Amino acid sequence: TTVDEDSGQGEGGSVAPTNGSSDSESGYAIRAIELVQVLWRKVDDHPVSYVPAELDRTHPTGANDGEWIIDHQSGANFFVPFEGVGKATYDHVLASIPTNGQTPQLAKDLNVAGLDVPTPSPN
């Protein structure tokens, strides 16, 4: 992880002022955060809906199990399980939702081994 000492911006982590309590010359401590990629699986076309690709197919998607987030520009719905999925926490999943009508990264596009991600059959 590197930090631009002029701006305090980190790459691959976050920074916080230490108020002089650190041994670092810049006065910033680096808090490492694990970057977790969340891939998506399309589960419906009307409305377009996605769940994390690693989410078990039998996992319920009701209000007690997570929340549906809507990208108002594209109209797509994304399910975010409260307990996260795999190594991804709730916050990782939430942060991975594409915004402004962007297309989500689908597991089938990366040909990820080990994920049960069938290619939808054409209608």
Image (cartoon, grey):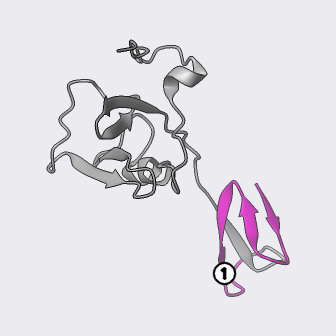
Instruction: Residue at 68%, 82% (x, y): give it.
Output: 21
Q: In the image, is residue 26 above or below residue 86?
A: below
Could you tell me residue 86's position as x and y percent? 40, 34
Q: Is residue 18 magenta?
A: yes
Could you tell me residue 94's position as x and y percent? 42, 53
Furthest residue toward front? 123
Please tell me how many numbered marks the rendered image carries. Answer: 1
- Of residue 89 and residue 120, the one placed in the foreground of this image is 120
Three-letter amino acid code at the position of disc 1:
Thr
Q: Is residue 84 magenta?
A: no
Which type of secondary structure does the marked residue at label 1 adopt? loop
Q: Which residue is mark 1?
A: 18
- Of residue 73 and residue 107, the one placed in the foreground of this image is 73
Could you tell me residue 54's position as x and y percent? 39, 28
Quadrant of the rendered image containing residue 118: top left
Q: Specify the segment rendered in magenta.
A: 1-22
Local crowd at mark 1 within 10 Å, few (<14), some, or many (≥20)?
some
**Left or right of 20 in this view: 80:** left
